Image (cartoon, rainbow, N blue to C red):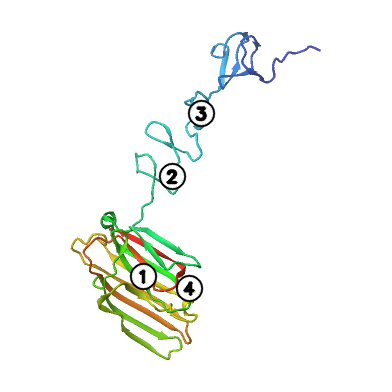
Amino acid sequence: MATINLGRVKPVFRGAYAGGTAYVVDDIVTSGNETFICIQASTGNATSNASYWTKLAAKGADGSNGTNGTDVGTTITTQGDILYRDGSGLQRLAAGTAGQVLQTGGSGANPSWGTVSSDFVKIASQELDSTGLNAVEFQNCFSATTDSTYGAFYLRIDCQKSGSGNSSLEFNFLTGTNTALTSASYNRFAGMEGYRRTDGSSNSIGQSSDGDGRDAFPIDGWGFTTGNNHTEGNSAVLEFGSHIYANNGRARNFFYRTVALDYSSPGYYAHKSVGARLEYNGTVTGLRIFLDSDNMHNGAITLWGLKK
C-alpha cells in the first residue's frame, strides 16, 4: 500500500524567534510582543521579512516606557495618587491634605484638592467634664478679621452645676489683654422670664431687666439652685450681631434665651428671653462665661461665626 505524506497537519508553536533556528511553513514564533507564522522555510530571516513571515497578532501602541499598552505605574507612584488626563495625556494628582475633598474645575479643567468651606464656622469651644470649670474664657475670639468675615455670632451653653448651693450663670465681654468689662454702665438688658410648676400649681411671667446695668449679664439661675435641682442644668443660646470687635459707631446689641427644668418638688419649667446692649466704645476681644459659685460641668460651650 502506498504511503501518502500529508505534510504538517497543524501549526507548531516554536517560542520566541531565534536567528539560528531553521523554521518551516506553519511554525509560529513570537517577536517584539507580536506573533508570526512562517510562510516559507528559511534560517536567519527575521520576522520583519514579509517573504518568510506573516503577522498573526499585533500589539497595541507602546506606552511611555516602550511596553505594550500604558504602564500607569510609572505615572502614579505613591499611595493616595489619583490618575487623570489633562490636555495631552495621563497625569498624576498627588494626595491632598487631611480633610480636603476632590474638586472639579468643570469642562476643560483639571481636578484638584480643595478645602470645604462652610458659612457656619466653629470659632471656639470648651468641653466640660464631670469636674468642670468655674469660668470659661474664649480669649481673642473677636478681631478685625472676624468683623469683616462674619455677619453674626452664635454662642450655645449646655451644662450642669457642681455642688448644691445657689448660683447664677453669667457672662462678660473681654477687652484688651482679656480684661472683663465689669462696669455696670456697660452691661444693660431688658426682657422677660416665665415659669410653670410641673404640677400646674402656679405659673408666672415677669421681667428680667436692669436698665441701670450690672457688673455682668445674668444668663440664668434656674437649674442652678439648691438640693438636686442642679442635676438638670441649663441650655442657653446667645446671638450677637456683626462688628463685635470694633465699635465703629454701631451699637453692640444682642439677645439671649435660656431654658431649664428645675427638679425641686414640685419642679419648674423656666424660660428667659432677654435683649441686651453693651455700651462700650473700645475694642472687644472675647467672652467670659462663669458661675458665681461652684463649677459648670457635664456639657459644652461653643461659639460659631456666621459668614456674611
Horizontal placement of 174 versus 5: left or right?
left
Spot the residue most to the bottom.
Answer: 201
User: Which percent across, then down, holds residue 64?
Assistant: 47, 26
Q: Residues within 10 Å of mark 4 (few under 14, many from 20)?
A: many
Element under disc 4: loop
Residue sitting at x 40%, y 68%? 157
User: Which percent across, then down, holds residue 185?
Assistant: 23, 72
Amino acid type at circle 4 is: Ser
Residue 97, numbered label: 2
How far apart are the alpha carbons under marks 3 and 2? 32 Å
Name which quarter of the figure residue 268 lies in: bottom left
Element under disc 3: loop
Amino acid type at circle 3 is: Gly
Q: Quarter holding the C terminus?
A: bottom left
Mark before the other along the chain sequence, 1 or 3: 3
How far apart are the alpha carbons under marks 1 and 3? 63 Å
The residue pinned by badge 1 equals 237
Question: In front: mark 3 or mark 2?
Answer: 2
The residue pinned by badge 3 equals 69
Q: Nearer the viewer, residue 239 or 63?
A: 239
Q: Residues within 10 Å of mark 2 (few under 14, many from 20)?
A: few
